[in-house]
Amino acid sequence: MFKLIQQDKNSRARIGKLTTSHGEIDTPCFMPVGTQGTVKALSPAELNDAGAQIMLSNAYHLFLRPGIEVIKKAGGLHKFISWYKPILTDSGGYQIFSLALLRKVSDEGVEFQSHIDGLKHFLRPEDVVDIQKNFASDIMMPLDECVHYPCAKDYAEVAMKRTLAWVRRSKVESGLLFGIVQGATYEDLRKECAQRLVEIGFDGYAIGGVSVGEPKNLRYNIINFVAGYLPQEKPRYLMGLGMPQDIFEAVEMGMDMFDCVIPTRYGRNGTAFISSGKITIRNATYTEDFKPLDDKCDCYTCKNFSRAYLRHLFNTDEILGLRLVSWHNVYFYLELMQKIREAIRQDRFIDFKKEFFESYNNKIE
Amino acid sequence: MFKLIQQDKNSRARIGKLTTSHGEIDTPCFMPVGTQGTVKALSPAELNDAGAQIMLSNAYHLFLRPGIEVIKKAGGLHKFISWYKPILTDSGGYQIFSLALLRKVSDEGVEFQSHIDGLKHFLRPEDVVDIQKNFASDIMMPLDECVHYPCAKDYAEVAMKRTLAWVRRSKVESGLLFGIVQGATYEDLRKECAQRLVEIGFDGYAIGGVSVGEPKNLRYNIINFVAGYLPQEKPRYLMGLGMPQDIFEAVEMGMDMFDCVIPTRYGRNGTAFISSGKITIRNATYTEDFKPLDDKCDCYTCKNFSRAYLRHLFNTDEILGLRLVSWHNVYFYLELMQKIREAIRQDRFIDFKKEFFESYNNKIE
């Protein structure tokens, strides 16, 4: 299912290939986020065109709307959303612990009220895997209890141990399931969680509970620390990150998979990622700027439209504006991953990282 | 510039070809509306894919944002918006008389406050043509005074005569300019306006001041009446209409060109035009309906997505939903025009109209 292809000579960065029944994924990879069964503002055709090999969706959101039955009757999530490449579904643990109302957590599972209509639901870890099986997800994530930063050690331990027990109960006969390492910012808890998960044995390992409010250096410490306890021969997924810097740092620490709403969320707000950094397209400075967002980019947006036109679209609240910048951003992220893989292949990841940030932080536009 | 190709044997319907420097347009044609330089929610590539041969934009809106200078410096409107087929620009007369604030109309021109920022502007008919020349529009429309229904005859006459004088002053050395027939619901005023315009001589003739609140039978009477005074050898453009019924009726009366915001506006609200009528995709009846919007349709939406998925997208306020229904609707309109042209070519327009409405009003879905 996962083949480690090459290890960078000068860092822990690595390239690999993940095989699922809906196709292969080259790692390190970025998974565009389609929380509700659509990567916001983009079509599946555009996602394909941008080079996506996998997308992420969310079991909690799809469980609430349109519900399991609709997706099951549609013939699974791929058919429902018309995306025929791999899909990883997040369990929604993070969402239940951040979006949902009035939670009651017990070892048995979690009771919560929908953030949409207030209706009460109770989900056990077994139910959450079942939902994802009904979706025919290529990669499933177990229910976990995700704590925010800062979190007292005694509660972090309770949540980590509950996550471990839940993840154990989520083990399935068929399909790919990843374990999730929790333990907040406590190294001993993280280590215990990682080691126990590896003992049980999963198809891949995710680091959860990062980007929950902690300082950046603490975040990188934890990722680096946990990565050391994960087996080489399995894919490692860093959940919910991040900015280009996060991705570079984590790839360097040996992480393989990433997902983040940033390219589309920023795109909808008119912030574009380009080789020289981030630009805010609404700014008056772009009023008569007839250059593309990024003259090094081959995406549909950059090949056809100027910054001046994109600024006009945002100024007039036209949907095409947020479509075009979202599309460009996803393209930018996916192309970045491809360049990262190529650099690792040539044993020059560290040089590439340096080159990238020399340009990226040079915001003369 | 306009070639009348064939006249239907059983009605005044006709097919023709309009030639501009950006390409040919088969008539009767529908022009998707891109008021602010974008057909709402669609990309130029999608518009092309839907079969559009021409789009419409609006001088008043583009004059306010992004302004003449930006579009001029971009190299014209086509380059600015990346649409390289013909563009007809409406003068914005209708918008000045409906959207703008505190108008002062005189024979010289119109003073108004922008509906966006309240800034005062004064435009003479000469300025309005100049703006469109700067945009490099393929077909220009002169400034006109558009009155609403009902309108007292004495004022309708003043407005018609002013329009006539303005249109006369808009005559250009180069570029295509259409005359606009005004005169509210008064046959004698309409007749006078049409005859005077034809005496001056324009590249085409538009019927303005329809769909401004008048009853349907009055509207059709006026269109039918005016059409009788327009020369056969010039294109006739019915401004701002309409529903499929409006288009069929007006084609039957010999009209050649149409524009309307309906396919995209309805699309954004989740109403789809299909061969059996209009459907409202949010309705619960589509929750588990895995058929396409229209199984006779070959558009991207119908080829890839179910009603159940579209409903889910609208229910969750996802942008892809309004994109997909807008795209389908534009495709539906453009395909309808193609079928109308084919029917006229075969001298069976009246039969085709009957067949269309037998299916269209049969809303068993």
Image: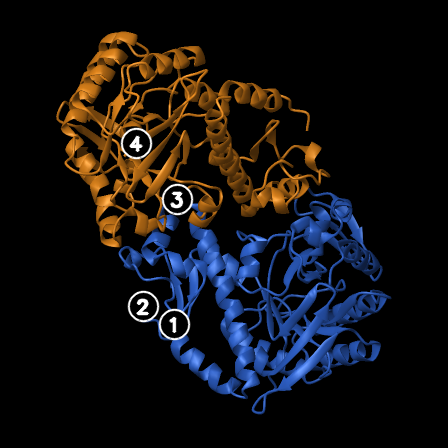
Chain colours: A orange, B blue
Q: Nearer the viewer, residue B83 or B184?
A: B83
Three-letter residue code for mark 4: Phe
Q: What SS does tag 4 mark?
A: strand
At which x and y percent is residue B30? 59, 68
Front position among marks 4 and 1: 4
Side (left or right) of B185 relative to A235: right
Front position among marks 3 and 1: 3
Q: What SS does tag 2 mark?
A: loop
Identity of the residue drawn at 30% across and 8% down: A187
The outermost residue toward the right is: B173
Q: What SS does tag 3 mark?
A: loop
Front position among marks 3 and 2: 3
Three-letter residue code for mark 2: Glu
Which image quadrant for residue A160? top left
Three-letter residue code for mark 1: Ser
Q: Which residue is mark 2?
A: B365
Q: Which residue is mark 1?
A: B276
Q: Residues within 10 Å of mark 2 (few under 14, many from 20)?
A: few
Q: CA distance from mark 3 to mark 1?
A: 28 Å
Q: Residues within 10 Å of mark 1 (few under 14, many from 20)?
A: some
Q: Earlier in the sequence, mark 1 or mark 2?
A: 1
Q: Which residue is mark 3?
A: A38
Determine if marks 2 and 4 fall on one subunit.
no
Q: CA distance from mark 4 to mark 3?
A: 26 Å
Q: Chain of mark 3?
A: A
Side (left or right) of B70 relative to A130: right
Determine if marks 3 and 2 fall on one subunit.
no
Determine if marks 3 and 1 fall on one subunit.
no
Identity of the residue drawn at 37% across and 14% down: A224
Q: Which residue is mark 4?
A: A2
Side (left or right) of A75 relative to B115: left
Q: Nearer the viewer, residue A158 or B159?
A: A158
